[in-house]
Amino acid sequence: MTNTKATMNGRLTFLILRGFFAQFWLLQFFGKVRNADSGTIAFGNLVDWSARTTDWFVKTTPMPAFAVAPYTYAIPYIELVLGLLIAAGFKTRWALLASAAYLVTLDLGLMLQLKHDVVGTNTITMLTVFLAVYLEKYNAYSLDQRLAPTSSATASP
């Protein structure tokens, strides 16, 4: 395989991975912003989602509400920011690593609930994030690439 073909394959592979993670996080967010009973989509629904999730989590784990509530309130916004950053290809490496760290924090709560099957799925997702971090050198179609200084701009006179 020629170097050019390998580079193009790497770029397309990374673009597909980036698209997957962008839609993954954005769909996680939209699942929370949509009210399942009425079908309405509004940021106000996030407060209800947070309250229901906090109540459920406090009942099923030893964690107190004062520790859980701020986290469940932040979850949708974390997912939205990660999804938008990855979709745009802006601060991509940081967003991917933040995705992995975020999955670890989610898994902590899931392990307290003995939801090991979901933790296993998240582990596969996290390993795929690490693959994307490794392939990030092929991040050609992104804001990161557009905003990167060119070699001629950094050359000394």
Image: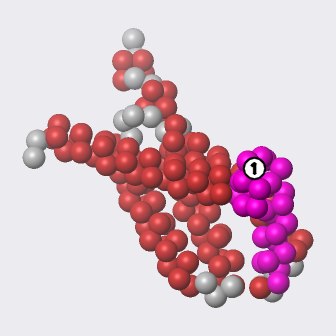
Q: Residues within 10 Å of mark 1 (few under 14, many from 20)?
A: few
Is 57 contained in the magenta span? Answer: yes
**147 lies above or below 138:** above
Is 85 contained in the magenta span? Answer: no
Q: How many marks?
A: 1
Percent of width and height locating residue 137: 36, 44
Percent of width and height locating residue 110: 65, 79
Give the extent of the magenta segment.
Answer: 32-59
Residue occupying image coordinates x 54% and y 62%: 100
Q: Is residue 3 visible?
A: yes
**119 lies above or below 15:** below
Residue nearest the viewer, comparing 91 with 111: 111
Q: Residue furthest front?
A: 38
Percent of width and height locating residue 61: 77, 85
Q: Which quadrant, please, contains the C terminus? A: top left
Percent of width and height locating residue 33: 72, 53
Residue occupying image coordinates x 65% and y 52%: 30
**134 lies above or below 141:** below
Tag 1's secondary structure? loop
Residue 149 figure quarter: top left
Amino acid on which disc 1 is placed: Thr
Q: Is residue 155 visible?
A: no
Question: Left of 11 or right of it: where is 156?
Answer: right
Q: Which residue is mark 1?
A: 40
Magenta-highlighted stretch: main secondary structure?
Answer: helix
Question: Left of 65 or right of it: where is 157?
Answer: left
Residue occupying image coordinates x 36% and y 23%: 151
**140 lies above or below 36:** above
